[in-house]
Amino acid sequence: MDVTHKLHPGQPFVPVTFKRLDAAEHTFGSPGSWQALFVIRGQHCPICKAYLVEIEKRRSAFEALGISIAAVSADNEAQTRMTAQAAPTEFPLLYGMDEAMMHALGLYVSEPRSAGETDHRFPEPALFVVNPEGVLHLVDLANAPFLRPDLDRLVRGLQFVIEKDYPVRGTRK
């Protein structure tokens, strides 16, 4: 049985680095600015592609709040390029998340239902928001493709958090 470690809000986030389609690396979680990382299941998931389109529609709202956004999957480069073609975004689509990273981030991991679905285990949806101090401010973990944050509510909530200096919640273990 695999052991999954759950991250706790209010704790320093250990930065993670993934590959970008432009061959650069993208590090998420370093102190300095607000950052949001959307974890998607991958190219095989039509709900993920639709959600990426919805995130892109709100990209300017995130940017207005000073929040950089990215999305990551366990897909390889070719699969991620297919996702980028199906759901073009101006924010980075990252790839190459391995199982050790999935477990380190506390993600729920699924087996493909068939070889036709995908060729690897993949994470279920999640969202991590790190504040400028490098602390995990918000976390949302799902175990199914249709459980994802409402993006309009998320943007309004982040605006409130930033404007009111709202503290990290849910820090009791």
Image (cartoon, grey):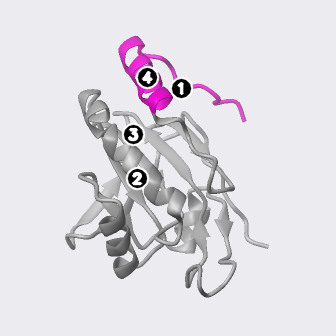
SS state under label 3: loop
The kind of residue on which mark 1 rests is Val
- Considering only order in the chain, which callout, 2 or 1, is on the residue closer to the N terminus? 2
Where is residue 72? Give x, y as percent.
42, 61
Mark 1 and 2 residues: CB-CB less than 8 Å, in contact? no
Q: Which residue bears the numbered disc 4?
A: 156
Are circles 3 and 1 on residues that touch, CB within 8 Å?
Answer: no
For marks 3 and 1, the one nearer the N-term is 3
What residue is shown with label 1?
Answer: 168
Q: Name the residue under label 3.
A: 134
Residues at marks 3 and 4 touching, judged by CB atoms closer than 8 Å: no
Q: Residue at x 61, y 58 (%)?
A: 107
Return the disc, 3 or 4, that comes first in the chain's sequence. Answer: 3
Q: Are marks 3 and 2 in contact (CB under 8 Å)?
A: no
Name the residue carrying label 2: 52
Q: Report the Cα–Cα distance between label 1 and label 4.
A: 16 Å
* Residue 27 image point, x, y percent: 32, 57
Q: Earlier in the sequence, mark 3 or mark 2?
A: 2
- Specify the amino acid type for callout 2: Leu
Which quadrant of the view contains residue 34? Answer: top left
Between 101 and 14, the one lying in front of the other is 101
